Image (cartoon, coloured by chain):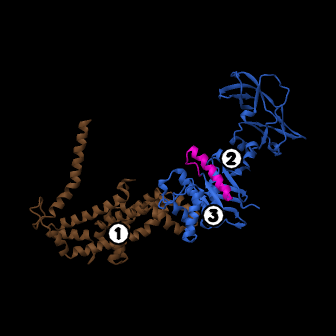
């Protein structure tokens, strides 16, 4: 019995090393004073962090990424909240099919989705690059919005809604005054998760970016193709910090169990 | 002229008719219960009155106006839910004030009314609490206050006490009845608990498969059930299916095979089509004496004898089926013993 626990402990340790090791190595190399990524680092320097802001494309694509993720998020919310509401509130024919369609962007390989969007949105319908990128990101965020808010609504007692109606509130007012406040934490979590998904996305952006318009992850890829200095490690550090902060906020709001549930 | 009338109402759910050609009318100021097992249509009826469901056919009249198509939020009915359905994100005060704020009432008037109604439901001093900080009984009283404060034209209860423990149920139903009578508010109350309905209602509607079997005062139903279904529901276990019924001056003569039976004329035998004699186990009597010639007697054999403490319960097999009899005695009859089963004519109720 005791031996078994030691074995399990060792195994967990290995898993942690395997998961967190690369992150630790990246963070260490970001402080490398030399011009080549190296581990262990030969000293300590913040020059590559400064370099991020010297390479104009980094701040510029960061801005694009933020704008696309926020705008896409807003669109995905406008589409996703009513969809999630309808899927939890009513039973109707074709509900399961609709559910599957709404979730399909997570199931279809990103490459396929990205290529298809490029083919139709840009090549066939000649949408501007920016619009195409926005649509692409809205589509990949939608399943997360619907899923997380849907899970929030599944524990919502719709009798509460009926109570508001019986007290004289119209359907819209009921939604905003009674339903929305009670799924608020679900909405915030959905927004954060969708934001991370969009902000870190490579496969869709790869197809949907174009001349003069790129996102941060794509710019990072391009950069690595040409340079092998620790700038990329420094950026990775900043992104990890951003992600960690967002995860912390989600955890505070509703616990990470939200991701593991169903 | 009744306050509320359901006129030939039909309600369908998933293409299945839950209510068909349903009629009900309720007088001003009364508390009427809808009582029946789950699936009998009582909750559907209540939700239709509330406006959560729309009738497929028929008319719902309220206070002389056609309410059939009036949406829920324009009806001004108070609804008390089984799950309480309090707004979790609002304090007790704001929960109760919700309906008043929608009515664009001045803040000091809102405050006055909320505090007054919280006093009525004995929750003064709780206004800052949140629903999660209250016990089940307190939550239900908030729910009642929230429904009452808008001065509804009608109060609707959907099994409001079924989530509470037994002691609380009894005190809460007394409370509901007190408030209802104090404010004189017309009320429809749905429950599957017979004792609950009988103790608080002016009238009880016993429902079965989307129909009202009987709508009467509780004491009338208890003594004079109208149908076999109602009779079974309130504890009549023995039925004689008579083939003929002959009404004479003071009595009713009934025939069961070669046996003659008599019943006394009273409210419980007055319906001319009722031809089933109904008895509670306590109403029947057993005797060893041979008196085949008298009316209202069937010979039988004791099948099972069960000791109940105060009395013995016997299952007696006769030519016309098995009957259940409770009898107080010191030495019980034995299984297999031949016995005569007496159906007292003054105890007989005739049902459909």
The chain identifier of the residue carrying mark 1 reads: A
Q: Secondary structure at mark 1?
A: helix
Residue under label 2, please give it: B198
Please tell me the colour of chain A: brown
Q: Is residue A19 visible?
A: yes
The 10 Å Cα crowd at callout 2, few under 14, some 14 to 19, many 20 or more, is: some
Which residue: 58% across, 58% down? B119
Please tell me the colour of chain B: blue
Query: In the rendering, at what x and y percent does residue A188 appear?
Result: 38, 64
Circles 2 and 1: CB atoms closer than 8 Å: no
Total labels: the figure holds 3
Query: In the rendering, at what x and y percent does residue A57 appear?
Result: 22, 75
Identify which residue, B35 or A119, lies in the foreground.
B35
Does residue B171 show up magenta in the picture?
yes
Residue under label 3, please give it: B151
For the residues labelled 2 and 1, the Cα–Cα distance comes to 62 Å
Badge nearest the viewer, 2 or 1: 2
- Relative vertical location of residue A187 with respect to residue B33 in this rendering, above or below: below
Q: Which residues, given as a range, are shown in magenta?
A: B160-189
Residue under label 1, please give it: A137
Identify which residue, B273 or B222, lies in the foreground.
B222
Query: In the rendering, at what x and y percent does residue B316 appear?
Result: 72, 28
Q: Is residue A209 visible?
A: no
Q: Quadrant of residue B266?
A: top right
Query: In the rendering, at what x and y percent does residue A30 appear?
Result: 16, 64
For the residues labelled 1 and 3, the Cα–Cα distance comes to 51 Å
Circles 1 and 3: CB atoms closer than 8 Å: no
Q: Quadrant of residue B321?
A: top right
Q: Secondary structure at mark 3?
A: loop
């Amino acid at each position: 019995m005791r031996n078994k626990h030691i074995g399990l402990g060792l195994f967990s340790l290995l898993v942690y090393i395997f998961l967190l090791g690369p992150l630790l190595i990246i963070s260490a190399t970001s402080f490398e004073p030399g011009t080549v990524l190296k581990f262990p680092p030969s000293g300590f320097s913040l020059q590559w962090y400064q370099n991020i802001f010297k390479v104009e494309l980094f701040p510029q694509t960061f801005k694009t990424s933020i704008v696309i993720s926020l705008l896409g998020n807003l669109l995905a919310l406008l589409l996703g909240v009513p969809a999630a509401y309808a899927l939890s509130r009513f039973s109707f024919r074709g509900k399961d099919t609709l559910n599957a369609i709404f979730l399909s962007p997570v199931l279809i390989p990103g490459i396929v989705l990205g290529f298809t969007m490029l083919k139709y949105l840009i090549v066939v319908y000649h949408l501007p690059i920016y619009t195409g990128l926005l649509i692409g990101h809205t589509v990949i965020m939608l399943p997360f919005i619907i899923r997380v808010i849907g899970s929030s609504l599944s524990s919502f007692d719709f009798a509460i809604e009926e109570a508001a109606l019986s007290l004289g509130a119209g359907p819209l007012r009921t939604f905003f005054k009674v339903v929305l406040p009670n799924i608020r934490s679900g909405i915030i979590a959905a927004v954060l998760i969708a934001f991370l998904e969009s902000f870190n996305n490579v496969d869709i952006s790869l197809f949907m970016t174009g001349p003069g318009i790129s996102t941060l992850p794509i710019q990072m890829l391009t950069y690595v193709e040409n340079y092998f200095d620790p700038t990329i490690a420094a950026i990775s550090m900043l992104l990890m910090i951003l992600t960690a902060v967002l995860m912390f906020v989600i955890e505070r709001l509703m616990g990470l169990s939200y991701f593991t549930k169903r | 002229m009744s306050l509320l009338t359901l006129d030939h109402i039909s309600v369908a759910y998933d293409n299945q008719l839950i209510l068909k050609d349903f009629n009900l009318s309720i007088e001003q100021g009364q508390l009427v219960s809808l009582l029946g097992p789950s699936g009998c249509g009582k909750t559907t009826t209540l939700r239709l009155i509330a406006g959560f469901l729309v009738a497929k056919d028929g008319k719902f009249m309220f206070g002389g106006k056609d309410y059939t198509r009036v949406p829920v939020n324009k009806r001004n009915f108070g609804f008390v839910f089984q799950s309480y359905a309090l707004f979790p994100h609002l304090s007790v005060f704001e929960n109760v004030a919700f309906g008043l704020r929608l009515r664009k009432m001045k803040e000091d008037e809102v405050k006055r009314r909320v505090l007054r109604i919280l006093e009525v439901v004995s929750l003064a001093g709780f206004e800052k609490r949140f629903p999660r900080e209250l016990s089940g009984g307190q939550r239900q009283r908030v729910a009642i206050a929230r429904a009452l404060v808008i001065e509804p034209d009608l109060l609707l209860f959907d099994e409001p006490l079924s989530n509470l423990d037994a002691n609380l149920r009894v005190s809460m139903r007394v409370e509901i009845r007190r408030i209802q009578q104090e404010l004189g508010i017309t009320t429809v109350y749905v429950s599957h608990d017979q004792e609950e309905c009988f103790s608080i209602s002016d009238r009880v509607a016993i429902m079965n498969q989307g129909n009202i079997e009987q709508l009467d005062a509780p004491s009338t139903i208890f003594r004079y059930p109208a149908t076999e279904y109602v009779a079974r529901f309130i504890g009549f276990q023995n039925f004689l299916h008579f083939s003929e019924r002959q009404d004479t001056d003071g009595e009713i003569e009934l025939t069961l095979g070669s046996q003659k039976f008599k019943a006394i004329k009273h409210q419980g035998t007055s319906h001319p089509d009722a031809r089933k004699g109904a008895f509670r186990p306590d109403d029947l009597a057993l005797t060893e004496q041979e008196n085949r010639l008298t009316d209202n007697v069937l010979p039988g054999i004791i099948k099972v004898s069960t000791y109940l403490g105060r009395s013995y319960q016997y299952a007696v097999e006769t030519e016309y089926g098995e009957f259940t009899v409770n009898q107080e005695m010191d030495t019980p009859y034995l299984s297999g013993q031949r016995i005569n089963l007496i159906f007292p004519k003054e105890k007989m109720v005739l049902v459909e």
